[in-house]
Image (cartoon, rainbow, N blue to C red):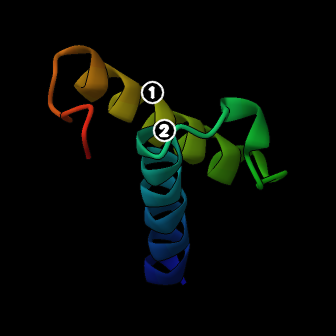
Amino acid sequence: MKRQKRDRLERAHAQGYRAAVTGRSKDNCPYQNLDARCQWLGGYREAMEDKSIGLFAKGQ
């Protein structure tokens, strides 16, 4: 059971990261569950930090 829960939360984190990289708004978080929502927003914040330090080129 723990593995399935962790996988779900890891997937939420990755989806949040991808959403930020592609320019979506953080208001578009698809999760209502608090844990998954926190993971999604954490991924979003991480991607925004990566963008601010220039990890992603503007042409991509």
Q: Circle 2: is it few (<14), some (14-19), or many (20+) Cα within 10 Å?
A: many
Q: Secondary structure at mark 1?
A: helix
Relative horizontal placement of residue 57, taking residue 37 as reference (left or right): left
Q: Nearer the viewer, residue 60 or 17?
A: 60
Relative horizontal placement of residue 53, taking residue 33 as reference (left or right): left
Q: Amino acid at mark 1?
A: Arg
Viewer-nearest of discs 2 and 1: 2
User: Residue at the spot x=17%, y=16% of the render?
Assistant: 53
Quickly name the residue at label 2. Answer: 20
Q: Amino acid at mark 2?
A: Ala
User: Residue at the spot x=51%, y=82% of the render?
Assistant: 4
Q: Secondary structure at mark 2?
A: helix
Q: Which mark is residue 23?
A: none
**Residue 58 figure quarter:** top left
Relative horizontal placement of residue 2, taking residue 28 as reference (left or right): left
Quadrant in the picture for the N terminus: bottom right
Quickly name the residue at label 1. Answer: 45
Residues at circles 2 and 1 in contact by the CB criterion of under 8 Å: yes
Spot occupied by residue 49 in the image (x, y as percentages of width and height): 31, 20
User: Residue at the spot x=35%, y=31% of the render?
Assistant: 46
Spot occupied by residue 9 in the image (x, y as percentages of width and height): 52, 61
